[in-house]
Image (tube, coloured by chain):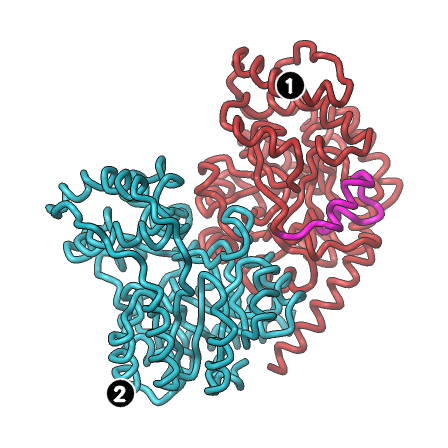
Chain colours: A cyan, B red
Amino acid sequence: LTEKLNIRYPIIQAGMAGGPTTPELIASVSNAGGLGMLGAGYMTAEKIEDAIKKIRLLTDRPFGINLFVPETPEWNEEKIRKSNEMLRPIREKLNLPDPGTIARPDPGQFLNQMEVVLESDVPVCAFTFGIPEKKIVERLKNRGIAVIGTATTADEAILNEKAGMDMVVAQGSEAGGHRGSFAAGFEMSMIGTMALVPQVADQVGIPVIAAGGIMDGRGVLAALVLGAQAVQMGTAFLACSESGAGRLYKEALLQSVETETTITSGFSGKPARGIQNAFIRMTRAVEDQLPDYPIQNALTRDIRQAAANRQDPEWQSMWSGQGIRLISEGSAADLIGQIISDVEKISKSILSY
Amino acid sequence: LTEKLNIRYPIIQAGMAGGPTTPELIASVSNAGGLGMLGAGYMTAEKIEDAIKKIRLLTDRPFGINLFVPETPEWNEEKIRKSNEMLRPIREKLNLPDPGTIARPDPGQFLNQMEVVLESDVPVCAFTFGIPEKKIVERLKNRGIAVIGTATTADEAILNEKAGMDMVVAQGSEAGGHRGSFAAGFEMSMIGTMALVPQVADQVGIPVIAAGGIMDGRGVLAALVLGAQAVQMGTAFLACSESGAGRLYKEALLQSVETETTITSGFSGKPARGIQNAFIRMTRAVEDQLPDYPIQNALTRDIRQAAANRQDPEWQSMWSGQGIRLISEGSAADLIGQIISDVEKISKSILSY
């Protein structure tokens, strides 16, 4: 896998959408020997193009782009109305005006994103929330772009392999942010990383990338032992100096413990793991009556952005995995250096054991 | 840890209550260099005494006894009535008579169990569902009996260490059977093993035993890499020839995949992971209105036993962890031999890496 991706260490920085993956973070990870990844799921084609240029100014090492495979949500006016009603007290608290009508999800955005990736010859393209059409996978591969899929069950990994993916992320239940499940239901696909990785590795021939709860050298080496050829780490990079996470989000990450994250659909209509806050508690009771992803996500955008601008931790999404006690500050390069040195140390102590 | 427990390999067979831990299984694990463990939570003192005698006929190696720390459930006649009403169609299906009144939980049973353990000088005593009184821990330690606690969060592990436990099991969310949570709420304590073990290892000074999703040499070595000094495996031993699990339960284990287990409180009033079946589906909607553990457990006992006797997989509890695709038949000794040989192989390949 490291050979195929032309990276020194089997460490991939997760393509966290919504801000944390700055060009600085991506370049820092790639320069340190890992694979930086732009979380481009919510970005327009123009913004992606712009980010790619900035990344290339900072590194000549490989990096990747992570995109969301579009879904066809049910457009339900009644659910939208109810969701806005539920959100009204939050908008009042944040001095936000009543929302106008939101635009219907535009399937063209994904195709535009794809064109930028193809034209820019980014070396790696990763997908989550499903598998893109065969034609897209073929075009990427024809350009020599490595294609990575996401699975939360062994069956989803098999579907990724059948679709021609070069490698697949096995996302365990510990992982922060959105669940990548697309074929299995939510509850049934909450498989812990320790159980998921070896079962996926036994079922597919393509390399497996372990994700979920991996925070340091112990987690990286454990994942390789379980049968993964690389790891994908998101939360571990969130509090790094190069990360675009806001100051209070970083503080929350550094102060929270493993029992303080939870899975919520309240922010986006799709299950995702983050640090408990007032927004999650408030939407808990009506979670299953909200509009589908990405409609609910569009509905809460003004709230999340206003809260982030005000540095208010209670009304923004603060995605985090369960390894949260192990989070570290410092630079991404320091983190990767520490991981590699710990992996070597543990490997040696195992041999003596 | 292996020195303290006087075992060759850091592999503990989980004390699964309700039948699987036959004297043959326990002796087989201990003879192979691991630590066999009697799941004695539901057993009378006399039955435990009897089992200990049988185990000692089969092995002179150390073994352990696992006990449930008693709780004080709320005795709610209305909830009991409603639960029996819900269970009526199942009883009819299984030709069971209407239940008589069940006995209130007897706190004396635990003390009697403790006396047997103390008098028999069993080398290891493990606890789950809480921490026993200080006096009990002291008496065990004074007899030279190693005392093992169970935790599902770092804070629960700290409580175990403060109570004088010699070592603590860190039970990840992948684990089969009952959750050992006692201080943290259910949802907040569903931490995956990959995230839980290093966080617990960082917080306590006593040795950590990893549990949850560990099925083979990969899992065992990964757990040691994460900072555990040993593993506890339950599901992995369930389909072994020496296990007391029924034939159809074993078949269900061998045929199921990782998406087919779920957490239910329907059988006992306490969350536990098992293979989905008709009983779990039927009780799902009313799960949170059932009597407390162990009252609900007593209410469903006739049903579970009748279903087990009839080899009916739909109405008995079939506890299992999420590593279920990796389950193997054969003897427990073969499984341990395979694990040790795989651990050696993987360790060597890591060094070359």
Residue at (79, 50) in percent of width and height: B30
Q: Position of residue A36 (x, y in %)?
A: 38, 77
Q: Position of residue B105 (x, y in %)?
A: 62, 18
Left or right of B332? Residue B76 is: left
Q: Which amino acid, mark 2?
A: Leu
| Same-chain status of marks 2 and 1 | no
Q: Which residues are magenta?
A: B236-258
In the rendered image, is residue A207 in sight? yes
Q: Which amino acid, mark 1?
A: Gly
Looking at the picture, tell me which residue is in the foreground, A61 or A347: A61
Q: Measured along the vertical axis of the image, is residue A222 above or below residue B10?
A: below
Q: Position of residue A110 (x, y in %)?
A: 36, 69
Q: Which residue is mark 1?
A: B108
Residue at (31, 63) in percent of width and height: A106
Q: Quick one: SS at disc 1?
A: helix
Residue at (44, 42) in percent of width and height: B188
Q: Quick one: SS at disc 2?
A: helix
Q: Quadrant of residue A13?
A: bottom left
Residue at (37, 41) in percent of width and height: A287
